[in-house]
Image (spheres, rainbow, N blue to C red):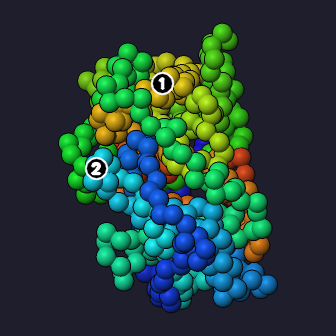
Amino acid sequence: MATSYQESSSLLLQDLKVTIKEASLIFPFQETLTHERKSMFLSNVDQVLNFDVQTVHFFRPNKDFPPEIVSEMLRKALVRAMDVYEFLAGRLRLNPSSGRLDVDCNGAGAGFVTAASEYTLEELGDLVYPNPAFAKLVTSQLQTLPKDDQPLFAFQFQNISRQLSLPSKREALINTSMQRPYSSQSSFSTTCHIPTPRVKIQDSETTTTVFEATSEHLDFNIFKISSQQILRLKEKASESISSTGCVRATGFNVVTALVWRCKALSFVEEEDLEKESTILYAVDIRGRLNPQLPSSYTGNAVLTAYAKAKRKALLEEPFGRIVEMVGEGANRITDEYARSAIDWGEMYKGFPHGEVLVSSWWKLGFAEVEYPWGKPKYCCPVVYHRKDIVLLFPDIDGDSKGVYVLAALPSKEMAKFQNWFEDTLS
């Protein structure tokens, strides 16, 4: 049985008593500012994925690295990073000639904020359970600047406080035309069968995300799946996966299949079994394009894969078949498919339709990053009020190969989700 972390929100600290000590802009070296000003093309993937992703990283105290020393190290590291990645000090602008968003590499600076809380790390309680108050630990905008001049970058950048070998400026600012659409008259309909977008943006005013926040009450629950349970899921899937197929029972595939089954069946009545369910999940396309994107590519390089089936099939089919459908969705994304999907984005400027999106932070490397003051005790995204997004993130401070599954659903749906979760793991 998976460990459930569902708790009453009344037990969580509602006010972290955070005081902003300093909020300022940090600029690249002066020699960087003298370079010819340029704008950076943003691919259709960047145009759609135009929203903030806020994370918090918790560290144990280290007597050799008090807060003031850490703050200064981060400040210097940020300047060093901006010297290579010039766009970090830029601003998002609407290009009047193309009607597209570009990054104006104008050296206007990145945000740097220092703050303090009256609480100790121990007093925050169980860090695993998503506390909405953690949003107080993240600065969404600098109050001294107008809304249309906010920094693209407020410090959440990993590894830069270590003496790493950063890429050259030429490598860091590679031409993102590698993800430009082939043409405005795409042939995507014959090569790229993407679920019809829920949101179509008719003009270039404001972007809207597909999975909008809901006003209804949601129960938040985190399910911990151990490495041993993942192994058993793989074994269960392998019993019915075709031996001649191209899908493997990977950790991601089995956990995503588990989430899809539980989410699809969490609100099913008898008459709903013939309805289709579509799951969406991100796939890294760096190695799938021809030529491949280099490791120094700094834009969004993910596309949305999908799997679709009737809910009755998710109820009755062997678990391995559900895993196969998830894997087949990722296998569709070849170079031709990816290029065609980028064309599709040029035409629709929206997000594919799906019943649930699995957003995986599981393999992003948070657990492997070791700062001079130590590895993080815990890292997590700031919780948001959306019931159609399920997050996967690693167990950093415990079972390094285990995974946490964060779901937010209305109470009745959460009860069913949990029942199906435990049923599938049994």
The picture places residue 33, in percent across and down from the top left corner, at 54, 72
Which residue appears at 61% of the width and 31% of the height? 291
Q: Name the disc covering residue 100, or none.
A: none
> What residue is shown with label 1?
337
**Residue extending furthest left?**
202
**Disc 1 to disc 2, how far (Cα)?**
29 Å
* Numbered disc 2: secondary structure: loop
* Residue count near mark 1 (Cα–Cα under 10 Å), binned few <14, some 14–19, many ≥20: many
Amino acid at circle 2: Ser
Residue found at x 42% / y 29%:
182
Q: Are marks 1 and 2 in contact (CB under 8 Å)?
A: no
Q: Is residue 132 above or below residue 241?
A: below
* 140 up-or-down from 258: above or below: below
Looking at the image, which residue is at 57% across and 74% down? Answer: 28
- Residue 219 figure quarter: bottom left
Disc 1 marks a residue whose amino acid type is: Tyr
| Front in this rendered view, residue 146 or 277 | 146
User: Toward the viewer: 311 or 88?
Assistant: 88
- In-image side of 75 versus 177 (left or right): right
Q: In the displayed orientation, state which residue is furthest to the top.
A: 244
Residue at 56% from the left image edge and 35% from the top image edge: 285
Q: Name above or below for residue 393 compared with residue 201.
A: below
Pick whichever, 43 or 320, lies toward us: 43
> Which of the 4 image quadrants contains residue 73?
bottom right
Check disc 2 and report the residue beneath it. Answer: 97
Q: Earlier in the sequence, mark 1 or mark 2?
A: 2
Compared to residue 373, the image places residue 327 above or below, namely above
Q: Position of residue 86 (x, y in %)?
A: 55, 63
